[in-house]
């Protein structure tokens, strides 16, 4: 077991229906996370809420449209808006996904509107390292890169996703956002569904100091024969909680976020999920201290 310390930070994803709650309810979590692109507009109510929230909570900016694995360069306008938001909010964490989103169609740059998977090859790694270096240099900040739910696999991939991310972290200085549910979804869809083994195989590849954040989420049960979709529409599953135990045992007190984006519960239910994460992590960390 490798445990760093027991001062764990637990946060929740902040979505529009909970804007009033985050500003009026007692402070019950350590930070909140928002999707960066939702606050790219000039002024408006949403940005006002974010500024007020920043007065009460540290903010984690989680981007979904950067497309670090794209063959096309990330548009300068996008990066300008992200940098402006970063300077305004001063987030304590900034994250994105190991995916592609930008491409060309009939000579026009287009955005996929989704987190599309990439092949895990050395060529893809070189390309993503260049993109990450560019963004980190422009922002003057360290990025945290998230593993993704992928609904297809590339035959040409000769690196595991974990090995790909470990190499990316080593070469760029970026850290890793470990999404436990994404590993579970991929396990169910492609690896026979032994989630505990899939998580164990994944996290043992990652250097202990490379993981800077953990995401926990739930996925709806699919109809027989259909893929599991990472829809963030229900509580964290027992198998993902067990995977979280494995992660805390290896990586220590890593800031942890509860993601819930669809079929949103009440604020109190969301906070209860965060409380469960805190209790579980603290239990594991306490055991590590005693050993």
Image (tube, rainbow, N blue to C red):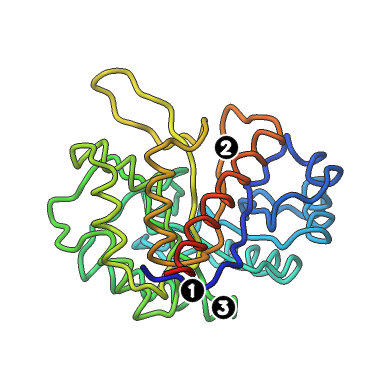
Tell me if residue 166 comes above or below residue 41 in the rendering: below
Give the distance between the C-alpha atoms of the residues marked 1 and 2, in whole angstroms.
31 Å
Q: Sequence order check: which comes first, mark 2 or mark 3?
A: 3
Could you say whether the residue bearing mark 2 is in a helix, strand or loop? loop
Residue drawn 51% across the image and 30% down it: 234
Give the distance between the C-alpha atoms of the residues marked 3 and 1, in whole angstroms.
31 Å
Nearest-to-viewer mark from 1 and 2: 1
Nearest-to-viewer mark from 3 and 1: 1
What is the x, y in percent for residue 240? 40, 43
Q: Mark 2 touching mark 3, by CB under 8 A?
A: no
Q: Mark 1 touching mark 2, by CB under 8 A?
A: no
- Residue sitting nearer the eye, 109 or 140: 140
Could you say whether the residue bearing mark 3 is in a helix, strand or loop? helix
**Tag 1 residue:** 4
Nearest-to-viewer mark from 2 and 3: 2
Q: In this view, does 124 lie to the left or right of 76?
A: left
Question: Could you classify mark 3 by the number of other residues whose Cα lies within 10 Å: few (under 14), some (14-19), or many (20 or more)?
Answer: few
> Residue 224: which quarter of the image?
top left
State the residue lying farthest toward the front.
290
Numbered circle sitting on residue 261: 2
Give the distance between the C-alpha atoms of the residues marked 2 and 3, in whole angstroms.
30 Å
What is the x, y in percent for residue 46? 77, 46
How many marks the image carries: the answer is 3
Q: Sequence order check: which comes first, mark 3 or mark 1?
A: 1
| On-image quarter of the C terminus | bottom left
Numbered circle sitting on residue 138: 3
Question: Could you classify mark 1 by the number of other residues whose Cα lies within 10 Å: few (under 14), some (14-19), or many (20 or more)?
Answer: some
| On-image quarter of the N terminus | bottom left
Residue drawn 37% across the image and 50% down it: 148
Residue drawn 28% across the image and 46% down it: 196
> Residue 19: which quarter of the image?
top right
């Amino acid at each position: 077991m490798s445990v760093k310390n027991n001062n764990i930070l637990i946060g929740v994803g902040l979505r529009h229906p909970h804007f009033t709650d985050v500003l009026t309810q007692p402070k019950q979590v350590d930070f909140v996370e928002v999707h960066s692109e939702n606050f790219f507009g000039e002024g408006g109510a949403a940005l006002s809420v974010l500024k007020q929230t920043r007065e009460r909570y540290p903010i984690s900016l989680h981007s979904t449209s950067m497309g670090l694995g794209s063959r096309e360069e990330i548009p300068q306008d996008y990066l300008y808006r992200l940098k402006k938001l970063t300077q305004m909010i001063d987030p304590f964490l900034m994250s994105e996904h190991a995916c592609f989103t930008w491409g060309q169609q009939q000579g026009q740059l287009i955005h996929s509107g989704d987190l599309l998977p990439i092949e895990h090859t050395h060529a893809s790694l070189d390309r993503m390292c260049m993109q990450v270096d560019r963004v980190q240099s422009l922002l003057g900040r360290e990025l945290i890169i998230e593993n993704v739910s992928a609904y297809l696999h590339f035959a040409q991939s000769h690196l595991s996703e974990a090995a790909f991310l470990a190499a990316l972290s080593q070469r760029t200085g970026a850290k890793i956002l470990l999404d436990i549910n994404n590993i579970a979804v991929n396990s169910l869809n492609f690896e026979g569904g032994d989630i505990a083994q899939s998580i164990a195989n994944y996290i043992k590849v990652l250097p202990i100091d490379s993981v800077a954040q953990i995401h926990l989420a739930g996925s709806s049960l699919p109809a027989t024969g259909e893929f599991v979709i990472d829809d963030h529409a229900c509580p964290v599953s027992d198998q993902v909680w067990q995977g979280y135990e494995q992660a805390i045992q290896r990586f220590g007190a890593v800031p942890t976020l509860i993601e819930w984006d669809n079929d949103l519960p009440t604020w109190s239910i969301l906070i209860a999920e965060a409380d469960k994460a805190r209790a579980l992590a603290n239990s594991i960390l306490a055991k590590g201290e005693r050993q």
